[in-house]
Image: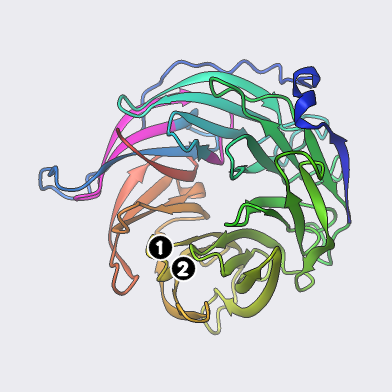
Amino acid sequence: MSHIVRAALPQALLTASRGWLSSLVLAGSLGAAPAYAWAQNAPATTSAPVYDLLVGTYTSGTSHGIYVYRFDSSDGRVTPVSSIQTVNPSYLVVSRDNRHVYAVNELPGDNGPANERGGISAFAFDPRAGQLTFIDRVSSEGNDPCYLALSPDGRYLLTANYSVATDPGGSFAVFPLQDGGGIGAAVLVVHHEGGGPVKGRQDNAHVHSTVFTPDGRYLFAQDLGGDKLYEYRYTNDGSRGLISPTPEGYVQMPAGSGPRHLVFDSSGRYAYLTSELAGTVTALQYANGKLRPLQVAPLAAPGFTGKIGAGAIHLSPDGKFLYATNRGDANEIVIFSVDPYDGLLKFVGRQSTLGRTPREFAIDPTGRWLIVGNQDSDSAFVFRRDPDTGLLASPTRLSIGSPVDFQFTPAS
C-alpha cells in the first residue's frame, strides 16, 4: 500500500515550507574534465548534428560532479567542454527548452546516516557554450534519490527516493518548477509500504522510478522492494489532489522480481520493464491507465550461473530495438527487436560493456551511437550502432570516474 504524507494544492505553493537543506555547500566552479577518446581519426564534418553530452557520476572517487562533452554524431567524436561540482549526481534530466538541468544528489548512500536526506539540484545550462551554473538545491524529502521525471506539462519535477534505510522508507516526491528554473519545496510526498521475499534487497519499499504515460494522464511508480508498479492519476489542475491513486492501486509483479525502470514506446500502446532481481525484461500492453503483462524475456544467456542485475532500459529512436543493461557478473547490454504489431520482443544479441557494473546508457538522437558507463571501472564506451540490425560495434573508451547517467541535448 501507499500513503500520502504531505500534500499541498498548487495555489498553496507560495506558502509551502522549503524544508530541510543539506549543510553541504555545492561549489559552482568548473573543474577540469576527465580524459576523452576519439571515435575516429577522420576530421569532423558539418553534415551531422552536434550534441552536448551530459554525464552524471558518483563522487566518492575521482569524479566531482556533472561533466559536459561535445558529441559529434558524424563520427562519434567526444570532446570535453566543462564540469561542475555537485555531490553524487547519479541521475539527470534536461528541461524541454534545454536551458536547465536537474540532478539528484544521491545521499546518504549505503553507509550514510539514515536521518540524512538526499537532494535535488537545479542548474542553468548554456547549450552553445556547454556550461552549467548552479541555481539552487532542495531536500528530496527522502533517502537516496535515484530518478527524475518532468511532468507532461513541464510544471513539476518528480524524484524517486530509493531509500536504503527502512525509516523513512521508499517514496516519491513532487516539486514545482519556478520561473528561472529553480525548484520549489515539495508539494507532495508519497510513501510506499511493504516489502518482498528477497532478504537484504526487499526488506522495505524501494521506489526506483516514476514514469508518466504518453497520454500524460497517469504516473507509474516502480517499487523494487514491494514488487509493484503503483498506478496514480495525474491532474495538474489539482482537482484530484494533483496525483492520486487509481482504484486498482498497482500492478503486482512476480514475487522477488524487483521492478526497476519502465519505458513506453512512441505509440503509447506498449511499455517495457526491467526487473532487477529477476534479471528480466517484461513487455506490457498499455491502455487507459492500465498495464497488462504480455511477455517476460530473460537477460542472462542460457546456462549462465553468475550474478545478474537488470538495470537501465531504452528504445532506439525508431522504436525498432530495445536495449537493457545486465549487471552482476554479466556486464552486458542485451538487444531485442520489437514487433511493431504486437509489441513482443525477440532476442537479437548481447554486447559486453567492457567493464564492471553498467548502469545507465543513452542512444544519441540520430540512432547511430550508444554510450554506456561502467560505474566500477571508471570508464564509458561509445559504440557504433547499426540501425538495421540493432547490433553494436567499434567501441571507443572514455575515461571518467564512476559514470552513471548520460543525457544528449542539442548544442544550439
Q: Amino acid at mark 1?
A: Ser
Q: Main secondary structure of the magenta part?
A: strand
Where 126 sits versus 269, above or below? above
Q: Give the extent of the magenta segment.
A: 67-92
251 left or right, relative to 90 = right
184 left or right, relative to 64 = right
Would you call the spot at circle 1 few (<14 residues within 10 Å), some (14-19), or many (20 or more)?
A: many
Using the rendered view, name the quadrant where residue 296 is placed: bottom right
97 within the magenta span: no
Where residue 180 appears, x then y in whole percent? 53, 20
Using the rendered view, name the quadrant where residue 271 is placed: bottom right
172 left or right, relative to 295 = right
Contact check, label 2 and label 1, Cβ < 8 Å: yes
The residue tagged 2 is: 322
Nearer to us in this view, 248 or 210? 248
- Residue located 80% across and 18% down the image: 15
Nearer to us in this view, 355 or 291? 291
The residue tagged with tag 1: helix, strand or loop? loop
- Residue located 80% across and 32% down the image: 9
77 within the magenta span: yes
Where residue 178 appears, x then y in whole percent? 61, 23
Q: Which quarter of the rendered picture does the N terminus lie within?
A: bottom right
The residue tagged 1 is: 316
Nearer to us in this view, 52 or 187? 187
Where residue 219 appears, x then y in whole percent? 69, 53
The residue tagged with tag 2: helix, strand or loop? strand
Q: Amino acid at mark 2?
A: Leu
Report, in whole angstroms, how far the alpha carbon at label 2 lies from the one at label 1: 6 Å
Residue 245 in view (yes/no): yes
**Colour basis:** rainbow
